[in-house]
Structures are given as structure tokens and as C-alpha cells.
Amino acid sequence: MAYWKNWNPPTIEKPIARLEWATDYASLVHEGAEDDEFIYPGRPWTDYAVAELDFENIFANKLGNDFNLQGAFVATVNVFIDLCEEAMTSPVWFWPRTTYRYNGDVVPPGERDIYDTGELFDSLIVEYLGGVS
């Protein structure tokens, strides 16, 4: 029989990362909206990122040989953030009318990115609420 007198395995909490794009119009861009004159199509960049990311495989690859659970979790979150940023800067979002952007660009109807001035892109706040102790 084997016996370990002083073995202290790590305590694992449910890891949680909260990502928020903190502009006042982030939910409008992500979910879309409708008013009396126009339908604003949603451009759900996080759904795009979720569809592109294989969380389990990324986490397993980031875990590596040192078994750093917190590091693997943070690295996985960072890959997700990279994919969100890729989605925001990729011209994959359909818009049904000409837009006069704040940066001076005139963009005709069709597929485009949602970067514009970068305010939404740069408004990301990441908060870690749980993990490994």
C-alpha cells in the first residue's frame, strides 16, 4: 500500500473570466435592434469567436508539461480574445446601407468590419473571478 503523509493537491475552483465591451453601444452592435425606420443587424463577434475556438484542445495544449491550470486558463481566454478581435476587424458583417464613419470613410452596403473608430474594439475589460489556488 502507498501512503503520502504530506501531499497537498491544488484546490481547484471553477475558473471564471468575465469579458465586457464597455461602450454604451456594444449590445446594439452585438445583438442588433429595430426602430421605426431601420433594422440594425446584429454582428455577434463573440459567437464568431466561440464557433472558431476549440476550448478543450486549446486548454489541453496550453496546459503543457508543467500542469499550470491558471496559466492554461488565462492563455485560453487570450486566444478567445484574439478571435474576438479578428472577428471585429474582419469584413464579414453585412450592413444594408451606406455608412459615413466617424473616421471619414464612406462604406457602401455590403460586408464590412465593425472596427470603425476602435472605441468598441478598445473597450474590452477582462475580469478573472475564479481559478486555481
Image (spheres, rainbow, N blue to C red):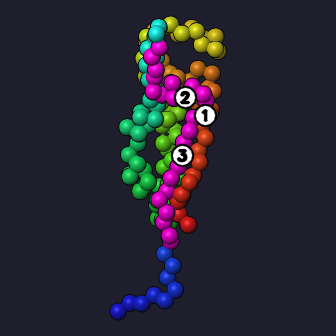
Counting from the top left corner in percent of width and height, residue 113 is at 50, 21
Q: Nearer the viewer, residue 56 or 123?
A: 123
Stretch in magenta = 10-35
Q: Nearer the viewer, residue 101 or 82?
A: 101
Residue at the spot 63% in from the left edge and 27% down from the top edge: 119
Q: Secondary structure at mark 1?
A: loop
Q: What residue sits right under mark 2 in the picture?
A: 26
The reply to whether callout 2 and callout 1 are in contact (CB within 8 Å) is: yes
> In 3D space, how far apart are the residues under numbered discs 2 and 3 (Cα atoms)?
15 Å
Q: Secondary structure at mark 2?
A: helix
- Residue type for callout 1: Ala
Residue 80, placed above or below residue 9: above
Q: Earlier in the sequence, mark 2 or mark 3?
A: 3
Q: Which mark is residue 9?
A: none
Tell me if I can see residue 72 in this picture: no
Counting from the top left corner in percent of width and height, residue 125 is at 61, 41
> In 3D space, how far apart are the residues under numbered discs 2 and 1 (Cα atoms)?
7 Å
Residue at the spot 48% in from the left edge and 28% down from the top edge: 30
Q: What residue sits right under mark 1 in the picture?
A: 22
Question: What is the quadrant of residue 133 in the picture?
Answer: bottom right
